[in-house]
Image (spheres, rainbow, N blue to C red):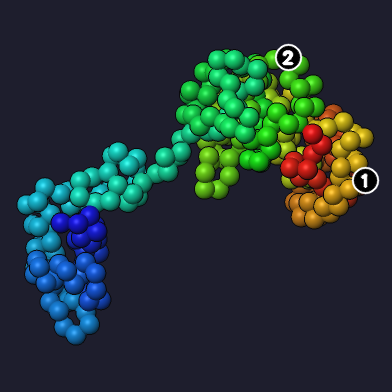
Amino acid sequence: MQSREVDFLRRLIADRPASRRLAGSASTLAELEGVGTVRGASVYYQSGDFERAANILRTRGFPLEVPTEAIARSDAPAGGSEKTRALRVSEDMVAVVPIGIPSSEVADGGFLALPVNAALAIPYSALLVCENMEPFCRLRSYTWLNAFYVGRPVLALFRGAPGFFRTEVAARLIRRDTRPTLAFFDFDPKGLAMAASVPRLQRLCLPDAIALEAATLSNRRAHLFTNSYAQCYGYLNTVEQPEIVQAWDCLKRLQIGLDQEHFPR
């Protein structure tokens, strides 16, 4: 029996529909297993059909139900697709780049995907939280970041994004850590607000003021300021961390933002 037919029988037992369109597994199981009655372009079901479906699964060694919660593929029940209700393989992992840690170095442009506990066990002295994936993969090209590392072993952490390396998993690592954090975010109201909310914030990582202002003016990304100004200005006006205050004052004066991807290198 094909996995799609096993899945169909399980859904049939759970949903107990009055009918299904005469196609695919509904058609095959009606013809070969006598599950349902074909009339016209549909297959019609009665209580005896649901019992027949259950008996087919039992006698062939398949569980009648699958877990309602998302599961690892390796925990999928017999017969069905291992992808049904499966968690992403990276579900409980974070993306990190060890910097200045010889035992854990990765090639330029690469990163490590690790469970939170394994990432926390890397011997680093400061945690760099990076907002976006492309700059995260090119961290070594931003040579001015070395001034913020001050010779310490640093673990760079991608803060996550919808669909992969979830933000809540990265946030869990940050909360569990005890080491100082460095914030590497976009130069816009939303980026500054996120940086200001990072626990144990030690430094805001931005290029020097002259280079940052020149790059911001030349790239002319006014939407990066206007898109999140109304949402963030109230919070940013309450922040007291000196580097955040200075960057916020600069943003309000320029009224233009800059994405990490276009920071000077």
Find disc 2 in the rendering and name its residue. 151
Instruction: Please provide percent x and percent y for residue 22.
Output: 22, 76
Horizontal side of 12 relative to 235 (left or right) equals left
Query: Alpha-carbon neighbours of circle 1 within 10 Å: few (<14), some, or many (≥20)?
Result: few
Residue 165 horizontal side relative to residue 264, left or right: left
Separation of marks 1 and 2 at Cα, in angstroms: 34 Å
Helix, strand or loop for disc 2: loop
Identify the residue at image location x=45%, y=39%: 91
State the residue at coordinates (79%, 21%).
Answer: 147
Question: What's the mark number on residue 253?
Answer: 1
Q: Is residue 183 visible?
A: no
Question: In the figure, residue 109 lies in which quadrant?
Answer: top right
Image quadrant occupied by the C terminus: top right
Residue 231 in percent (x, y) is at 75, 51
Labelled disc at residue 124: none
Pointer 1 or 2: first along the chain:
2
The 10 Å Cα crowd at callout 2, few under 14, some 14 to 19, many 20 or more, is few
